[in-house]
Image: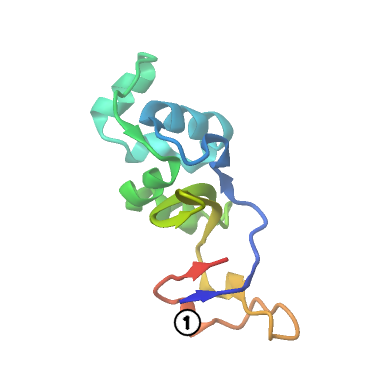
Amino acid sequence: VVLRAYLDVKNPIDLTIFGYRKVDMGDVVRYILAFYPQTNLLKYLPKKFVKLIKNQEKFNITIRAWQLIRQFNPWVKAVKKEGVFDGFMYSENNPSHILNGKEHTTKAFAVFYSNQIKFPNQTEFNHFLDDFRFEEGGILI
């Protein structure tokens, strides 16, 4: 199900610089460390990755930036708990959705709380109302 909605995302961690292409995971980690140091990403990385960062070496693991969000769930939970950022902004691809002969790509958002998502039929944005339809996540356009 695809639903139109308004998002309240004022301070996301922006990973759109990487687009949807695969890049060395170390580049994504270094970017986050440089622009979002307060997220303490190093604390949540395996020791072998921390060593590669300190030695300025490549990880030799290619990922799409949005995959970091899915692979380091404890880090995402810590970012959410800290309360400085209210979500992520990234580009994603959908190999199962072909548009004009190519994978469909889009800018995407991941928010931390269901009350950051509102539908157009609501008369105003109310931070205090949760929407049960997004408790388990959802696809928005």
Left or right relative to 122: residue 24: left
* Residue farthest to the front, as pictured: 101
Instruction: Quadrant for the N terminus, please.
Output: bottom left
122 relative to 34, above or below: below
Residue 115: percent from left, percent from top: 57, 75
Q: Residue 116: name its quadrant.
A: bottom right
Q: Amino acid at mark 1?
A: Arg
Residue at (52, 35) in percent of width and height? 18
Q: Nearer the viewer, residue 108 or 116?
A: 108
9 relative to 34, above or below: below
Residue 14: percent from left, percent from top: 58, 44
The total number of labels drawn is 1
The residue wearing badge 1 is 133
Left or right relative to 53: residue 131: right
Residue 121: percent from left, percent from top: 68, 86
**Which SS class for mark 1?**
helix
Q: Residue 16: name its quadrant.
A: top right
Residue at (65, 65) in percent of width and height? 8
* Residue farthest to the right, as pictured: 123
